[in-house]
Amino acid sequence: MTDANARTAANVVLASAGVAAAYVILTRPPLRRLAFSVVRYWLGASVPVFLLNQARQAWVESGSRHA
C-alpha cells in the first residue's frame, strides 16, 4: 500500500466515523442537547479570548519602536 492510498483509507475511515457520530448525536435528543450546549459554551469562551488576544497583539504592534 502506498502512502497516498494509506492516507486515503485513513481519511475515509475518519469521515465514516464522523458521519456515524453525527447521526447518533442528531437522532438522540439528550445527546443533541448536550452537543449544542457544549458548542454554545465553547463559542462563549473561545471567541472572546481570541478577540482579546487580537486586541492585545494589535496594541503591542502599534507601540513606538526605539532603535
Image (cartoon, rainbow, N blue to C red):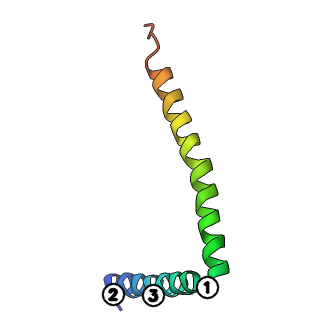
| Residue 67 in the image, given as x and y percentages of width and height | 43, 7
Q: Which is closer to the viewer, label 2 or label 3? A: 3
User: Could you tell me how far apart the alpha carbons at marks 2 and 1 are, in whole angstroms?
Assistant: 35 Å
Q: Is residue 40 above or below residue 65?
A: below
Vertical relation: 34 (above or below) 54: below
| Residue 17 image position (x, y, % from top left) | 50, 86
On the rendered structure, is 27 left or right of 5? right
Q: Residue at x 55, y 34 (%)?
A: 52
For badge 2, the amino acid type reads Asn
Label 2 neighbour load within 10 Å: few <14, some 14-19, many 20+: few
Identify whether 37 is placed above or below 65. Answer: below
Return the disc, 2 or 1, that comes first in the chain's sequence: 2
Give the residue at mark 2: 5
Residue 66 image-quadrant placement: top left
Residue beneath the point at 53% across and 27% down: 56
Q: Which is nearer the N-term, disc 3 or disc 1?
A: 3
Classify 10 Å Cα crowding around label 3: few (below 14), some (14-19), many (20 and above).
Answer: few
Q: Residue at x 63, y 81 (%)?
A: 29
Taking depth in this image into account, of 22 and 17 the one nearest to the observer is 22
- The answer to which of marks 2 and 3 sits earlier in the sequence is 2
Q: Is residue 47 above or below residue 10?
A: above
Q: Nearer the viewer, residue 11 or 20?
A: 20
Q: Residue furthest bottom?
A: 1
Give the label, 2 or 1, closer to the camera: 1
| Image coordinates for residue 15, horizontal then vertical, percent | 43, 82
User: Looking at the picture, which amino acid does disc 1 mark?
Assistant: Arg
For residue 31, side relative to residue 67 (left or right)? right
Question: Which of pointers 3 and 1 indicates the residue nearer the eye?
Answer: 1
Residue that numbered label 3 is attached to: 16
Residue nearest the observer in this picture, 56 or 32: 32
Which residue is disc 1 drawn over? Answer: 28
